C-alpha cells in the first residue's frame, strides 16, 4: 500500500478493519505535518524542560486521537480535524509544563516573599486591570486553581486556549501565531475572557 494511492477516508476505513499497514501509512503521511507543528511550537518551550521529540511524540498521540474520533459525517475534513488534535495535544503539553514549572517554583520559594516568575503571570495579574478593576483581587494558590476551573467552564474552546496561553505569559503576537489567528481576534477573546473571569470572581466572593 502507498498513501498516494488512497485518500484519508479510505485509509481510515481500512484502519477500522484493523489493517495495521493502513495505520502505519497514515502515520507516515502525517509525519511531516507533525514535525512542522512541533518545530513551530518548540520555539515557545524555553525553560520548560521539553525537547522537540517530546512534542513530536505528543503530536503522534494527537493523530491517534484524531483517527479514533473522526466523524466523516461532519463538515471538517480529516486533515483539518487531525491538525487541530495534533496542535491541541502539543499545546496542552507546553501549557502543562509551564504551569508545573511555575507551581514548583512557587512552592520552593514560598517563604521568600513575592515571586516574579516570567513564565506565568498568575490569575490575579490577568484579572487585574488598573483602568477598571471592580475590587482588589487577592487570590491564594488553592483559590486560584479552583477559580481557573470555574472560569474555564464558561469559556469556548478557543477562549480556553487563549486563556491558558495568556496565563502562561505568552504575548498577543505569540498567541496569534500559535493559534493561527489575527492579533485582533486574540485581543477580542481576551476581553471576553476577562469579563467572564471578573464576573465569576464577583459571583463567588
Image (spheres, helix red, strand yellow):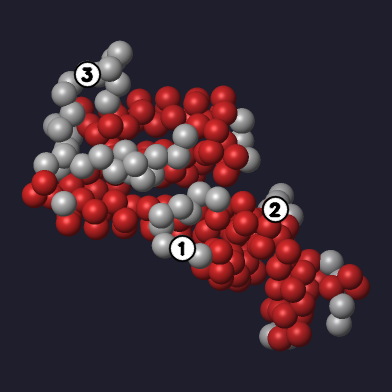
Q: Is residue 121 left or right of residue 37?
A: left
Q: Is residue 195 left or right of residue 54?
A: left
Q: Is residue 183 above or below residue 1?
A: above
**Residue 172 appears in the picture as rendered:** yes
**Residue 203 appears in the picture as rendered:** no
Q: Earlier in the sequence, mark 3 or mark 2?
A: 2
Q: Which residue is mark 3?
A: 134
In three-dimensional space, the C-alpha distance between marks 2 and 1, rounded to whole angstroms, equals 26 Å
Q: Which label sits on residue 50?
A: 1
The crowd level at tag 3 (other Cα within 10 Å; few <14, some 14-19, many 20+) is few
Task: Indicate the secondary structure of the residue bearing disc 1.
Answer: loop
Q: Which label sits on residue 37?
A: none
Rendered residue at 70%/53% (across/down): 80
In three-dimensional space, the C-alpha distance between marks 1 and 3, rounded to whole angstroms, equals 39 Å
Task: Indicate the secondary structure of the residue bearing disc 2.
Answer: helix
Q: Which label sits on residue 80?
A: 2
Q: Earlier in the sequence, mark 1 or mark 3?
A: 1
Q: Position of residue 91 (x, y in %)?
A: 50, 54
Amino acid at each position: 500500500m502507498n498513501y498516494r494511492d488512497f485518500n484519508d477516508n479510505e485509509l481510515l476505513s481500512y484502519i477500522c478493519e484493523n489493517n495495521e499497514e493502513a495505520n502505519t501509512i497514515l502515520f507516515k503521511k502525517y509525519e511531516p505535518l507533525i514535525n512542522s507543528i512541533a518545530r513551530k511550537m518548540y520555539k515557545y518551550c524555553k525553560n520548560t524542560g521539553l525537547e522537540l521529540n517530546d512534542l513530536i511524540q505528543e503530536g503522534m498521540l494527537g493523530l491517534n486521537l484524531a483517527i479514533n474520533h473522526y466523524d466523516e459525517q461532519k463538515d471538517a475534513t480529516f486533515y483539518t480535524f487531525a491538525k487541530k488534535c495534533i496542535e491541541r495535544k502539543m499545546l496542552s503539553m507546553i501549557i502543562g509544563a509551564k504551569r508545573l514549572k511555575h507551581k514548583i517554583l512557587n512552592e520552593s520559594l514560598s517563604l521568600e516573599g513575592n515571586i516574579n516568575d516570567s513564565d506565568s503571570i498568575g490569575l490575579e495579574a490577568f484579572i487585574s486591570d488598573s483602568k477598571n478593576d471592580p475590587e482588589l483581587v487577592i487570590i491564594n494558590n488553592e483559590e486560584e486553581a479552583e477559580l481557573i476551573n470555574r472560569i474555564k467552564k464558561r469559556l469556548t474552546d478557543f477562549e480556553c486556549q487563549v486563556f491558558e496561553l495568556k496565563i502562561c505569559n505568552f504575548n498577543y503576537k505569540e498567541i496569534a501565531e500559535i493559534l493561527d489567528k489575527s492579533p485582533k481576534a486574540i485581543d477580542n477573546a481576551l476581553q471576553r475572557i476577562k469579563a467572564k473571569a471578573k464576573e465569576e470572581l464577583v459571583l463567588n466572593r
